[in-house]
Amino acid sequence: MSSTGKSPFGLVLPGLPQILLCPEKNPGWEKLFLAFQQLRSEMETQSIDGLILYSTYWPSVIGHQIQSYPEPQWTHVDDEFHDLGSIPYHFRVDSDLAQTINEQAKARGLHSRTVSYKGFPIDTGCVVALKLLNPDNRWPVVIVSSNVYADRAETIVFGKAAKGAIESSGKNIVPIIITSLSNRLHTHWIRPEEDHIHSLKDQEWNQKILEFLSAGRLEDVSQLSRQFHREARVPKVANFKPFWWLASVLGQNNFYTGRIYEYQPVFGSGAAIISLTPSDRAARDLEFDENDPEKFLGERQVIS
Amino acid sequence: MPNKGKIVAGVLAPHPPHLVYAENPPQNEPRAECGWENLRWAYERLRKSLSHLDYDVLVVHSPHWRTQVGTHFLGVEKFSSLSVDPVFPNLFRYHYDLAVDVSLAQQIHDQAEKEGLTVKMMKNPHFRIDYGTIISCHMTNPTWDKPIVGISSNGAARYFNMEVLQAEMLRLGEATRKAIEDSGKKAVLLASNSLSHRHFTVEGEVPEDMSREHISNHNQYLWDMKIIDLMKKGKTEEILSIMSDFTETATAETDGGSLSWLLSALKIPKYPAEIHGYGSVIGTGNAVVEWRTPL
């Protein structure tokens, strides 16, 4: 364990249950399943002390919520794909790290709280990703919510709270965003073999994002979040925030080595498994023009 | 051939968990001192009103069971578990034990399918009932002595727009009414949604501190009063005609389609609704409203 904690790399992971519950029904789902296995086996050779998941599947209203219950245990069923089966889970949470993130968030002016309740409903995205990446609880985890009213500044500050907590922990912690790229599901039932990205437009935007990330351009993707939200996301929340958070935790720049483990459609949405490892050399050092706040200075009356 | 069934009443029955929290029922773990009395007393008046009615089942349409692929129906006869609100876990950790009228659910499902809607029965026994369904049903019938039919809300308002969703909900409402009539049962319908729905993003140390409670903004309040005024005047067709504007401008929870479904099932009533009460909960606007179907 080093004296100053750090993030050796960051991950983008999908969270739809087909990948876990029935990968054999579609070759693309199976490729995603195998890519999770490959990623997991590679991570097992590295010095990693824990994971922090920012889940787009866990909306919060009262500021930011941070899961701190030591051993969440339940049998989860997805609201939509309940016929695929039940998912029993038993996770190991790093309650101390959760508490530190909360303290850091409060110190930066955010309204945040830890949640520690038996039976709290961990979301489908985190359940699926953790069952695939961390099935034996090798790494303790922290899960943080995605506030529906937060926009960029607030999300950046929340990411900095996580970064500060990682540094003060002295641990090697991998930040992970649980999100699809394009998120438009089919709105009618399809046979698994018929699965495809919902539209050509979604597919093209996904490929653009993948191109940037494979070149290590995390900050450029972060800067594209608003446009991506308009072009390829069903507008269920104010904005597409996960890359803001990830860039804030890892560093708001384009100095990364990006690796696309897999990209496939899952029920119409774009599911990608991607790693971003800090590198000495910028893929491309583009200018960006938004502020880089250290403290949250108050709600901006964002409409969800 | 059974007697013709009937919707005996329809209710706008919002589901803020704060109301159950403040009621302190034995099923809920957290304890409150008080709070949100105007809405809790509105539910008391509703319960008193419904106590004079003979009905068999509560049919509830919930924004918090959100599905993107059509409309889903609870299809298991008994559910017993713990519901923890993911947004307000400090207020709502409720041990539920409820019965579902699967036969009626299947009839509504089949009727909706016959009319071209995408539908699915939810048959997984491990499924956790959403807190919207639980709260609306608890506040309406805390003894849980009636079975329920649980209906999901569809995300078409965000996938397409409110007009698309409303068109589907009008068809679902008609299918619901037809199935209830065919079933021979007497049903009370619950639309489990708030009106305006912009929350505060902070919460006080004491959640039931009513000195902090008010509507989020005046714009929302004006919209809520406009909708309630139309309800009182029996002008529900006008509500449907402005539903899109209301939903967008007041960030209303009608984006789940519950109110549109209810009004359609009630044949878009021209008679006045009974407003049992209105109040804000963490900034959102909520009304408990009853349409008593004429004899």
Image (cartoon, coloured by chain):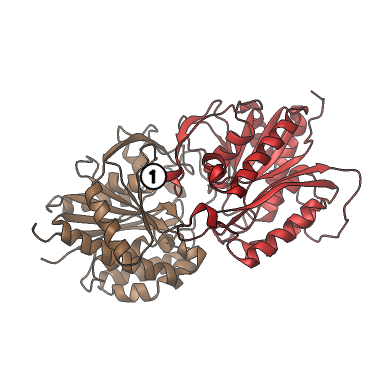
Looking at the image, the residue that sits furthest to the right is A281
Q: Position of residue B294 (x, y in %)?
A: 14, 67
- Of residues B69 and A91, the one drawn nearer to the viewer in this rendering: B69
Check disc 1: other Cα within 10 Å, few if <14, some if 14-19, many if 20+: many
Which residue is tagged 1?
B131
Q: Is residue B111 left or right of residue B129?
A: left
Which image quadrant: the N terminus of chain A? Answer: top right
**From what the image shows, is residue A182 above or below residue B44?**
below
**From what the image shows, is residue A196 above or below residue A109?**
below
Which image quadrant: the C terminus of chain A? Answer: bottom right
Task: Tell me, yes or no, if residue A297 can be seen here.
Answer: no
Looking at the image, the residue that sits furthest to the top is A1
Q: Is residue B17 left or right of residue A261?
A: left
Q: Which residue appears at 80% of the width and 49% of the height?
A: A252
Number of residue marks: 1
Q: Which chain is red?
A: A
Q: Position of residue A71 (x, y in %)?
A: 54, 26
Task: Tell me, yes or no, if residue B69 can be seen here.
Answer: yes
Q: Which residue appears at 24% of the width and 56% of the height?
A: B107
Q: Which residue appears at 27% of the width and 67% of the height?
A: B174
Three-letter residue code for mark 1: Tyr
Q: Position of residue A294 (x, y in %)?
A: 76, 47
Q: Colour of chain B?
A: brown
